[in-house]
Image: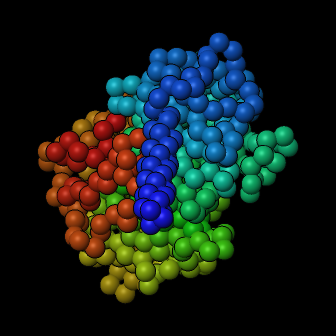
Amino acid sequence: MKKIVTYLLVLFLAIGFLTGCQKAAEDKADIYKAPLLIAQPISDAAPLCGAIKGTMLSGKTYIIGCDIVVNKGDTLFLQPGVRINVATNAAIIVKGTFVSNGTQTMPNWITVNAVVKNDTPGADPATDPAFSGKWKGLYADTSCMLMVLKYTHLEFAGAALGSTTSPLIANTSNTSSFSVLFQNYNGSFVMEDSWTYGGVDDPVRISSGNIALFRNTMEKGGLNGGDGFNVKGGTVGDMAYNLFVGNATSGQKVSNKGQPIGAPTSNVIMYNSTFINCGYRQIQTGRGANINFEEGARGKFYNNLAVNCKFGYRVVKTPVSDTANLFYGNNYQYADSLLVANQFFPVGYITRPQTTDLPLPSAYLPANYSLGTAYNGTAAVQSGNPLFINYPLPVTGGIKLRDIATVGNFNFRLQASSPCIGKGYTGFNLSPLQKVAIDPVFGVSYYPQPGVDVGCFQFNGSGNNH
């Protein structure tokens, strides 16, 4: 009898343990799915300030009246079709999780009410609202493990944090003026199919983290400086099919500067992006590339298209990038003028010509060309027009290259006769790193493979869909 009692006791304990495990698993599943359920809808009846969590509902417009904070362990979830109007000098601070789940048919907007864009070519940056920093931006603290932007418009950010907001966010100062900041090397930052417009410094600063940045469009990024996607030490992941028009400096930059203890070396795979008229508002000499690798960073960049950017693809000599682990090729450049063609291989830097580059470097570089030295690029001027569907090359009508900084009515997709078609590299060693989990809501939607055509728009209709 004693043996039977003991057996039954063990059986009941085992059943209890298994039931507890099953309940724990169900609880975790519920937590994972919780933001999709409207368990805590956020009211749009009054301006939002202070601590916030829950779900912003489709079709509603919310007003942020002062700094809001998503505390550690909390989630702010935006259903498709949400609009957020941010008051002057307010910030969205994320210590927990932030997910903006817009869709192609119902994108989300984080913007400023009643501010009118000025997309006229040649608009004065000093008076252009794109560069005025109407609100502070979307800032992740070091405790934020996940920030996701899908089909989200982010506009007019970049005001300085100031003495009130900066103490709430690690590794920032009163003068920090990014539009988006992410900084957790154990966390994930996803930005896909989204838009940024304007900004004062970097539109997107990733101080560290696992990243997936696909099919985005960036216009007027930065006033007198700032890189579109500016990646620092401890960042690993992928960038592809992005469009940059009129960035102040680089479109995509990778550095290992500021690597946190225990973080990996910065390593980013870049492919199939397009850069138009970048680099002309940068006030520092020798800056303004479309792609920039520096300070111990490693990675790859292939199949990119740069048109009339102030400087070409930039591999930095001092402090030197990790050239032993940096690979590139099949990159295309076009120049209206000799000033641009003379910097396809920027003077003072160590970008190495590749036989797969277009136009072919040997057609304009001297036979004894030494990395970083000046050359005469006359033969490259207006060579290899990429033949966009609707964009004037060479730029005419007295418009300067710096004057065109938005997509506007232009169409940067390729004509059927474009020399960019079929020039992309798709070899096995260009596979994305895939550091972020695939998930339709809480991760990257999918990992696009390198395209057969150069640039962010593929002739078959894939790639960037803006």
The quadrant in which the N terminus is found is bottom left
- Residue 57 x/y as whole percent: 50, 22
Left or right of 412: which side holds 70? right
Residue visible at 55% across and 57% down in the picture? 187
Q: In the rendered view, would you say 174 is above or below 131? A: below
- Residue 463 x/y as whole percent: 28, 47
Residue visible at 63% across and 36% down in the picture? 157
From the viewer's side, name the closer residue of 83 and 306. 83
| Residue that protrudes farthest toward the left in the picture | 416
Residue visible at 75% across and 31% down in the picture? 50
Colour scheme of the rendered structure: rainbow
Residue visible at 62% across and 18% down in the picture? 43
The quadrant in which the C terminus is found is top left
Left or right of 86: which side holds 442? left
Left or right of 263: which side holds 400? left
| Residue that protrudes farthest toward the right in the picture | 163
From the viewer's side, name the closer residue of 105 and 270. 105
Which quadrant would residue 379 be assigned to in this image? bottom left
Q: Can residue 342 be seen in this view?
A: no
From the viewer's side, name the closer residue of 150 and 427. 150
- Residue 61 x/y as whole percent: 56, 18
Which quadrant would residue 240 be assigned to in this image? bottom left
- Residue 284 x/y as whole percent: 65, 59
| Residue that protrudes farthest toward the top in the picture | 45
Q: Is residue 41 visible?
A: yes
